Amino acid sequence: MSDQMNETWDETIDFRRLFAVLQKWVWLLVAGLAIGAISAYIFSRTQTPVYEATTNILVTRNSQQTVADLTQSLNLSQLVETYVRILSMDDFLGIVSQRVDYEVAAENVDVSALTNTQIIELQVQDADPRRAARIADTMVAVLIEQNETLQASRYGDAEQSLDLQIKETETRIADFQRQLDQAKDNALVEQVAEAKTNIDATVEVINTTLADLERLDKMSWESARFYLYRAKYDLVEQQSRLDQYIADRSDLESKLATDPVAQTDTNYAATLQTRMENLDERIEATRQQIEETQKEIEFLTPLDTEEGFNKVVVEKQNFLKTQQALLASYQNVYTNLLSTEEVKRTTNEIDNLEKNLALYQEIYLNLLSSLEGVKTQKMQNTPTVEQVSPASAGEDPVKPRTLLNTLLGGLAGLILSGSIVVLRESTDDTIKSREDVEKLLETRVIGYIVDIANEGDEDGIYVARVPRSPVAEAFRSLRTNLEFSGEAKPLKTLLVTSSGPSEGKTTIAANLAAILAHGGKKVVLVDADLRRPRIHRYTGISNDSGLSDLVNAEQAEGISAYLQRPDNIPELAILTSGGLPSNPTELLGSKKMRHLMQLLVDAYDYVVIDAPPMVVADPHVLSGIVDGVLLVMVPGKTRTDVVRAIREQMQQSHARLVGVVFNRLKHRRRAGYTGYSYYYYPYYHSSDYYYSKSDEKADARQRNKRSASRRNERNKRDTKVPAPNSEKPT
């Protein structure tokens, strides 16, 4: 059931992805449709109008017969098709071109035979309607002139065609006759064998019944009861003996496999093998005895009473009479088959062959009759060609067809733009869905974070400002998934990194740390990005001293002096990056850094580390001293080759990748990227269940006030003295 649900879900995801791709590129499809339609419309409007002249040609036969037969109608239809072909031939059009002193192209002439009539419809297209009518009339005149030269060859072709059909039909008749004879022979053999089999089977049943009656005649119901009790007793003994044989054989088999003597002494092993073979023979013989005893019990069971005994005797006698009558019937059938050698029961194959044979015999007779009719009427019938009415051209042009061309142009533009979309999507090697992540990294996507609108530096941690927002719910879901990931192995230190820059790893790290702190845990957020630190800007705190200063300090035990706590999250401690060192990789990989991490682990429940992207060596150094790595990706931006490189680097460093977080997802799913929507977010967002417009405006006002206050404090600090919480311990 679970596999079926998973398959159904995969099919749903594929359909959604296709729909998302169409939604993403709908502008290109519409543009291709519009450009194609407009181009076709303009092209059609610039073409020279073409007019069409139409005339009809009647093909008749001057027959001396009063009644037309099927052969005459058939030949007339062939004659009409012949004239149609002649009117379309290049040589014929060349003669017409000479007559009208104008080049007549084959693509401007359309000739067709009207269904179930003797009329040929001739259509000629030209830019001049009068010239089109003249060409059509000239074509009819030339056809009438050539009609006489066509007659001789026409009958000769008909006779040759009929002769060929007669020979083919004779061959088919002989073939079907041979197959029919073979099918009858096979059926006779099968029916004789079937009758013999039925006789043998019935004789065997009669013999068995006679033996049963003879046995019943020699016993009474009292003796049958005695034999039944004895058979049941024998069955118990035989079953017990079989169980003992099986147990002895199992012991010998175990001894042969485990006994050291049997492993080293081949003679002893051969003796055990011989004893096992003897036991196999006894087991098989005992099983046969049990089968016979069971049949005996089955035979004697209804005989243990006088009424049952008499009933069985009567049934056996009646059954014997029935089988004897059936045997006589089978013997009669068998004798008739051997004496007459005729099939008594037909088959589908024989029926089909007889029908086909009769059909081709009828066709053969018809062909002979047609051939005689052609020979008889060859000199009697003279086909004639007549023009029903002079050719006339319409007042309105037939080309170009602006509306049709516009529709076809739009369709061509749509197909072209669709091909571009398919090519673009097939060459796009970015990560788009959770399936891509699972395939490349063999891990799960455990978080889906939407793009946080109107967020900037010094605004503070978002989930602390808007704790009841859908984004906060998404981070709570991420926290839950991380807790599940830590069930098998503790997950106290978590490294947050990304595949490349500007993918929001700092946002994920800060908000995740805040959510962990909201859960009642002691959390410290460490800014280990010693190249482009942003934790202090994101949270709006000072970066006068931090990680680099603490690692370089002689005593790392004074950690509390370097830690800062946001006003709205007192449970969260933040260790900023401090001064930017010239050797960040060596500093992060030093023993002091490991000692510092151990102190943080001892003092806090969770240590969340904001590390540089994987394009540098810093996160690879840090991955060796943390419990897990959380990788941040942006669907549609992160490339698959980068992800493959990350996988190889993590395998080399033996890092534990706990999962991937999709960041900067749109509130409305971005076209082309599927598989990352989570079930509760659309509900909460669409209903504004957690966050109203008034709350958003109030947050914006408070954020502006805090930003202005921090700027004033920073200006004062720059002009006076450093902040007290940034002083280093003595």
Image (cartoon, rainbow, N blue to C red):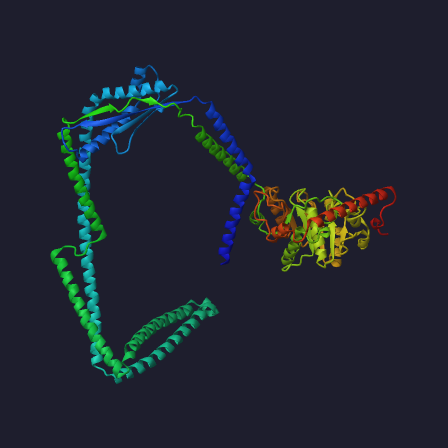
Q: Residue 194, located in which quarter of the rendered image?
A: bottom left
Q: In this view, does 1 lie to the left or right of 357?
A: right
Q: Position of residue 238 (x, y in %)?
A: 35, 77
Looking at this rendering, what residue extends furthest in the bottom direction? 222
Residue in view at x 61 percent, y 50 percent: 682
Q: In this view, does 226 lie above or below 459?
A: below
Point out residue 69 in the picture as x, y percentages from the top left corner: 17, 35
Name of the residue lying farthest toward the front: 395
Is residue 514 shown left or right of residue 685? right
User: x, y (%) of residue 666?
Assistant: 62, 45
Residue 708 makes an appearance in the image:
yes
Q: Is residue 264 visible?
A: no
In front here: 714 or 84? 84
Q: In this view, does 204 lie above or below 574?
A: below
Q: Nearer the viewer, residue 177 or 105?
A: 105
Query: Is residue 354 or residue 141 the one in the foreground?
Result: 141
- The foreground one among 512 and 195 is 512
Q: Which residue lies furthest to the top in this view?
A: 101
Tell me what residue is drawn at x 50 percent, y 50 percent: 11
In the displayed orientation, state which residue is furthest to the right.
720
| Count of picture labels | 0
In the displayed structure image, the side of residue 560 where residue 254 appears, left or right = left
Q: Where is residue 649 in the image (x, y as percent from the top left)?
A: 63, 46
> Taking 395 as reference, is 176 above or below it?
below
Residue drawn at the location 62% of the way across and 41% of the way down: 637
Q: Which residue is drawn at 22% across and 48% down?
A: 352
